[in-house]
Image: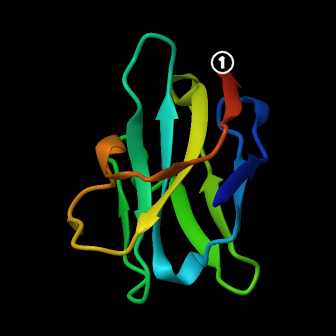
Amino acid sequence: QVQLVESGGGSVQAGGSLRLSCAASRYTAGNAVFGWFRQDTGKEREGIATIHPFSGVTVYAPSVEGRFTISRDNAENTVFLQMNSLKPSDTAMYYCAATPAGRFSLSRPLRAYEVIYWGQGTQVTVSS
């Protein structure tokens, strides 16, 4: 069974940085679409960053564009989310997601209904 395990969450002051990691077992990072989602209390789960296999194309939500960077290490089967210039509005539970490569839009991040596998989540809290 595919497992996605996130790490790297925590508490940081506004303007700070965090790097999230997602280790994928029994799954090849280079052959799947990976994404990062976040969900704050009472809100819908939002796709914020996606990286496509083979091409390596990355797509971001406008709310994080220019501040967050998604990347992957195929050799280590790990996907990362570098988060810079963090704001209190970035506070949420962050989830790693993966789905088999397919015909997904390159103009927007993955949507929750397109995801097959989810990690357990890691909390990010940004204080002002």
> Residue 98 vs residue 91: left or right?
left
User: Picture coordinates of residue 90 (x, y %)?
Assistant: 54, 30
Numbered-mark total: 1
> Residue 48 vs residue 84: left or right?
left
User: Picture coordinates of residue 67 (x, y %)?
Assistant: 51, 52
Q: Which residue is drawn at 38% across and 87% down?
A: 55
Q: Mark 1 points at which residue?
A: 128
Q: Residue at x 54, y 62 (%)?
A: 69
Name the amino acid, label 1: Ser
Q: Is residue 86 visible?
A: no
Q: Which residue is drawn at 57% across and 26% down?
A: 92
Q: For mark 1, give the secondary structure.
A: loop
Q: Which residue is drawn at 43% across and 46% down?
A: 64
User: Picture coordinates of residue 20 (x, y %)?
Assistant: 70, 52
Q: Is residue 50 above or below residue 47?
A: below
**Quadrant showing the C terminus:** top right
Q: Which of 128 and 110 is in front in this view?
A: 110
> Residue 115 vs residue 108: left or right?
right
User: Picture coordinates of residue 68 (x, y %)?
Assistant: 53, 54
